């Protein structure tokens, strides 16, 4: 299950309001390195991708990992550009969609919330992998396990 609209909003607020706090920079960089599939709301996904691309630092042509320009004037400029020219984020993004950027999400967004947010970001793909692994091992999937009567009638028909 990707982030719902409320958690997505808090995540975007965290990225756009706490970038000058050294304690949050590594967490913001980690969040920016995540795939966009973890954000379920389409407008929030566009804002996330805008921030991800806008805050990406220069990278050499070699296979260097992505780096981010989190903190300082350049970060503020990317955020302000999104707030004052939302059409640069996406054609369907309005000023109301980006109005909350740069506003601190509040004290409930702490390290424990951030770790839970990471779990929620990847929750659905992990379930799919578990089902695929159980099918390969010959174990019934969750849907098949819920139907014991069908398995019993097949077994009695074979006997």
Image: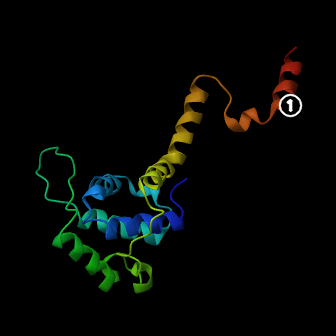
Residue drawn at the location 43% of the way across and 57% of the way down: 110
Which quadrant would the C terminus be assigned to in this image? Answer: top right
Q: Specify the farthest residue to the front.
A: 107
Q: Position of residue 98 (x, y in %)?
A: 39, 79
Q: Is residue 33 above or below residue 88?
A: above
Residue pictured at 86% horizontal, 31% vertical: 149
Q: Kindly indicate the quadrant of the structure image that contains residue 43.
A: bottom left
Task: Describe residue 72's horizontal placement relative to residue 132 as left or right.
Answer: left
Q: Nearer the viewer, residue 23 or 159?
A: 23
SS label for mark 1: helix
Instruction: Point out residue 15 in the picture as x, y percentages from the top left corner.
Output: 34, 65
The location of residue 104, given as percent across then percent down, is 39, 72
- Rendering quarter of residue 103: bottom left
Residue 38 shows in this picture: yes
User: Which residue bears the numbered disc 1?
Assistant: 149
Q: State whether residue 49 is above or below residue 29.
A: below
Q: Is residue 92 above or below residue 65?
A: below
Q: Please, is residue 44 above or below residue 22 in the view? A: below
- Please state which of residues 51 and 63 is positioned toward the viewer in this rendering: 51
- Residue at 33 percent across and 54 percent down: it is 27
Asked whether 19 or 87 is in front, the reply is 19
Q: How many numbered tags mark residues here? A: 1
Considering depth in this image, is 58 or 103 the residue closer to the camera? 103
């Amino acid at each position: 299950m990707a982030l719902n609209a409320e958690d997505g909003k808090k995540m975007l607020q965290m990225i756009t309001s706490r970038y000058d706090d050294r304690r949050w920079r590594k967490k913001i960089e980690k969040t920016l390195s995540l795939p966009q599939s973890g954000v379920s709301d389409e407008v929030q996904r566009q804002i996330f991708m805008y921030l991800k691309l806008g805050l990406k630092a220069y990278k050499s042509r070699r296979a260097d990992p992505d780096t981010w320009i989190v903190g300082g004037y350049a970060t503020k400029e990317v955020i302000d550009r999104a707030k004052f020219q939302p059409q640069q984020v996406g054609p369907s993004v309005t000023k109301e969609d980006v109005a909350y950027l740069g506003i601190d999400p509040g004290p409930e967004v702490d390290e424990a919330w951030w770790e839970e947010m990471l779990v929620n970001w990847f929750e659905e793909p992990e379930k799919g992998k578990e089902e695929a692994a159980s099918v390969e091992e010959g174990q019934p999937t969750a849907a098949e396990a819920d139907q014991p009567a069908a398995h019993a009638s097949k077994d009695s028909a074979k006997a």
